[in-house]
Amino acid sequence: MLDGTWMANETNKLYLDCIHCGLCLSSCPTYRVLGSEMDSPRGRIYLMRALDEGRTKITDSFIEHMFRCLDCRACETACPSGVHFGQMMEEMRGKIVEENPAHWFSRWMLQYVFPYPWRFQIASRLLGLYRVSGIQAMIRETGLLRFLAPRMADAEALMPEIGIERGVTLDSFYRAEGRKQGTVAFFTGCVMNSMLGSINRSSIRLLNAAGYDVIVPGEQICCGALANHAGLRDTAKEMARKNIAAFPIEDLDAVIINAAGCGAMLKEYPLLIDGAEGFSAKVKDIAEFLVSTRIFARLKLPLERRVGYDDPCHLIHGQRIRSEPRTLLKAIPGIEFVEIEGADQCCGSAGIYNITQNELSMKILDQKMEKIEKAHIDILATGNPGCMFQFKYGARKFGIELEVAHPVELLARSLGEIQ
């Protein structure tokens, strides 16, 4: 029986830092939509403390409140006491899942597909085949899937518009252009490399143009973020160990990542396993890294578009990176940069949250899309694959003519053709 003993050590007593001021409430996506105290950071901390003190037990309602959290970390940015809410939530979920296993399909995907790049690549190509073959159109037209399996229908509706060959096979080494400034390693990510491969190519091209040799370790796997958020802590720990072993950090200036969720996870490996500090200290988001390089001098081709930027939660809240992507985008000739209202608020994607909590996710997305529509932009830039897929779906749902792009795609266009 799971009780409060899981909080017996100092790390899990982090809830004591909360002074219950409520400044986190307005930042919390679930509280803004539901208006429920127990679906706010303060309410969830109250439940954790009640569990620790023996005033409550793990019930279905308790689990629901914990897994309704998007783990967006906006409450951490708002908190004057520096409460490490995300750390508490992930530990709590891990203990819940020990006695209340996740759905078999989620466990299978997170434990037996995501950790193996070739398996994920196959799965991605099958999704692409499903789309281009006409089967997707037939399924959607008949509505049969929603009748037989509503949750699967929700997932299918959110499926990105990918083709069969969207993934890429990267070389192990890419040479710097011009005078060499250093050497970095590139973390490919499972979703990025399989579904948004051109973004990885653009990222490497930019790093080379900035004067850096780029190595791409072949033994790297999924970062483990989705498994960790789902409470599969042991799976996430094993992924962390394998990734650290894959990167020769002593020979590198940095480990570069272009997906916000992956970057936050890599930087927080020390919270999962011992001895990860050296690796995590080298991890840099690509915008965080490029803003201090010579890349600005290479941006030549104009992009005459109104461009807005939406902050991925695990970049602005998880890594406290806000100005760097904006600085890079504003440096592109011709761009009219538009600041979007609520750009720092969650879009509702949150890994696979838009599948597991679809109704709530869509309400959160609707709030975002209303603000994006008012901005009258041509391009929405954001630095996380889940956010990109969510916004592409939102644009289709709202009937908005909107290009959704990663910032590196726009930077690469200004740089010139990818070689």
Image (tube, helix red, strand yellow):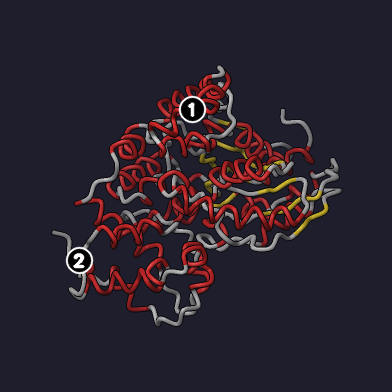
Choose top left, top right, bottom left or bottom right for residue 390.
top right
Decide if residue 42 is in sight here.
yes
Residue picked out by circle 2? 57
Q: Is residue 240 left or right of residue 198?
A: left
Which one is earlier in the sequence, the residue at label 1 or at label 2?
A: 2
Choose top left, top right, bottom left or bottom right for residue 268.
bottom left
Task: List x then y, in percent, for residue 233.
Answer: 30, 50
Identify the element where label 1 is drawn. Answer: helix
Residue picked out by circle 1? 124
Task: List x then y, in percent, for residue 413.
Answer: 76, 38
- Camera-nearest label, 1 or 2: 2
Residues tagged 1 and 2 counted as in contact (Cβ below 8 A): no
Q: Where is 260 relative to 342, above or below?
A: above
Q: Where is 375 relative to 128, above or below?
A: below
Mark 1: few/some/many CA within 10 Å (<14, 14-19, 20+): many
Q: Is residue 399 left or right of residue 361?
A: right
Mark 2: few/some/many CA within 10 Å (<14, 14-19, 20+): some
**Residue at left offset 75%, top offset 56%:** 375
Q: Is residue 9 left or right of residue 158?
A: left
The quarter of the picture where the N terminus appears is bottom left
**Residue at left offset 47%, top offset 62%:** 30
Task: List x then y, in percent, for residue 380.
Answer: 70, 48
Q: What distance separates the C-alpha of mark 1 from that of mark 2?
A: 40 Å
Q: Nearer the viewer, residue 120 or 222?
A: 120
* Kind of residue at badge 1: Ser
Identify the element where label 2 is drawn. Answer: loop
* Kind of residue at badge 2: Lys
Total labels drawn: 2
The quarter of the picture where the C terminus appears is top right
